[in-house]
Image: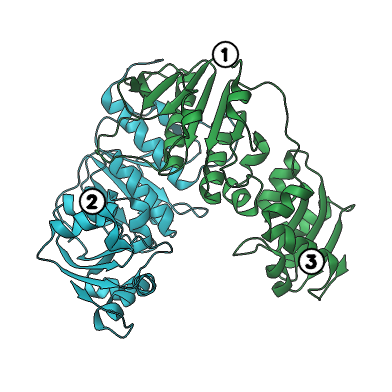
Chain colours: A green, B cyan
Amino acid sequence: MKHVSSRDNALLRRLRRLATSARERRESGLTLLDGVHLVEAAEAAGVILQELLVSEHGVQQPEIDALLARHPGVAVTLVPDTLFAHASPVDSPSGVLALIATPPETDASLSSSVIVLDGVQDPGNLGTILRTAAAAGVGDALLTTGCAQAWAPRTLRAGMGGHFRLHIRERVDVSTALAGFQGRIVATGVGANARSLYETELTGAVVWLFGAEGAGLSPAVAALATDVVTIPMPGEVESLNVGAAAAVCLFEQVRQRLGTALNR
Amino acid sequence: MKHVSSRDNALLRRLRRLATSARERRESGLTLLDGVHLVEAAEAAGVILQELLVSEHGVQQPEIDALLARHPGVAVTLVPDTLFAHASPVDSPSGVLALIATPPETDASLSSSVIVLDGVQDPGNLGTILRTAAAAGVGDALLTTGCAQAWAPRTLRAGMGGHFRLHIRERVDVSTALAGFQGRIVATGVGANARSLYETELTGAVVWLFGAEGAGLSPAVAALATDVVTIPMPGEVESLNVGAAAAVCLFEQVRQRLGTALNR
């Protein structure tokens, strides 16, 4: 384990750039995982840890100690808590930070459960939706250029490891990506051709289209929908947060695929 | 319309205190609504606007102009944009701010759909759950002392007006509040006595117990549950964000109460 106590250290400067610059992350193909939970999720997915940074406070925690012990071949740098906070991408740093290569995008064909996220700009919202999608067994997440960065540290934190259970593609041209998709392409909304979510058959292959808070789907993406579904809202409130709407839709799909039977 | 251009103005100082101090809001029984959407939701619920503050930029917007025209009896103060931002409780001020009395708490008996929020500390999460609950037709929201303030400006903003469609009670002793409740009291979780959400009858009266991110329910609240339900997660991710879990549960209740019939 190497000790560093100067901000001018090359590794710290590199981590700091990755923590603060979306461009740096994109161009280098690298990102940072803050916290044992995220690092464990990456390990479980077979992601290789390139470097580990630990704080003096962190190294005393048993779960961080155990993490270091599992990776004897990975370079570990120990820094004072204040320097750790300087390099960390999050507001409440955990004490351990891993440098990883962003998992490569696949060009395999789409699974039978896909989400398209169009212009979801808030990293917290985006991460929460990826977490929900992973829990619901979604296979692919396609993000348009208007979205926050999927592998940004704040998105990763909200994603709670869900990132590593999905195939994520960023800056996607949705029309091209969905060409030849055999199944429903479903937008949420209202209108003459909209049907209740609960009266829509979701056991086959489905692509879900979720748009930005406020603005909704861009016209080009909305035009790809084969179905428009409405979430019935007895409370007469006009809309749900996009994360809540995604949770309702994706778990209605889970319910239907499980084939459970209450209250027909 | 009164013009003010000094930070030392008594009204501005008062609004600034309400914007920044939870204690000031609680002790005065007042809060601030930022933006036309929230003010309209309050109007629709019959809430009286005590004062209106508008920015020079805001007063030129047709929807803010229309809002002022609907309330000829309410004192309006016009301030430069920088002063408005100083008084506003939110990061991206909208241009109109209303001072209101926090709606009084009811001690009426509970409705047939109730949520208990135990230690939900993040105002954004709390507001999103209140918005979801209002959309799902929930009647009552009971908050423990560990929760963020329901009527804090950040909670209100995330709530998108849902606050005005619910009976909200804060700093509730849950055991006392649920004494005599005739119906299921449902916690989400796992364990030997847990049942699938989708195999749990939810058409009768239900109280939902939702706990803090991470820590979950406090033991005293968890002990009140008559049922523990599990949200099936095919993706093998260990948990959902509390807002996503609430959306899934509350809209499964909506679905069952609608009695819709697909994929039994």
Q: Residue at x 24, y 32 (%)?
A: B204
Q: Is residue B259 above or below residue B171?
A: above
Cα distance between the residues tagged 1 and 3: 48 Å
Q: Is residue B115 left or right of residue A251?
A: left
Residue at mark 2: B41
Classify 10 Å Cα crowding around label 3: few (below 14), some (14-19), many (20 and above).
many
Q: Earlier in the sequence, mark 1 or mark 3?
A: 3
The residue lying toward the viewer, choosing from B195 and A109, is A109
The quadrant of the picture occupied by the N terminus of chain B is: bottom left
Q: Of the residues shown, which amino acid type is indicated by label 2?
A: Ala
Res A71 seen here: yes
The quadrant of the picture occupied by the C terminus of chain B is: top left
Q: Residue at x 44, y 31 (%)?
A: B195
Residue at mark 3: A12
Q: Position of residue A133 (x, y in %)?
A: 55, 35
Q: Is residue A126 above or below residue B85?
A: above
Q: Residue at x 51, y 47 (%)?
A: A125
Labels 2 and 3 touching (C-beta < 8 A): no
Chain letter of disc 2 in the image:
B
Chain letter of disc 1 in the image:
A
Q: Of the residues shown, which amino acid type is indicated by label 1?
A: Gln
Q: Is residue A188 above or below residue B65?
A: above
Chain letter of disc 3 in the image:
A
Q: Of the residues shown, which amino acid type is indicated by label 3?
A: Leu
Q: Position of residue A19 (x, y in %)?
A: 69, 59
In this figure, what is the number of numbered marks?
A: 3
Residue at mark 1: A182
Q: Residue furthest left?
A: B73
Res B168 seen here: no
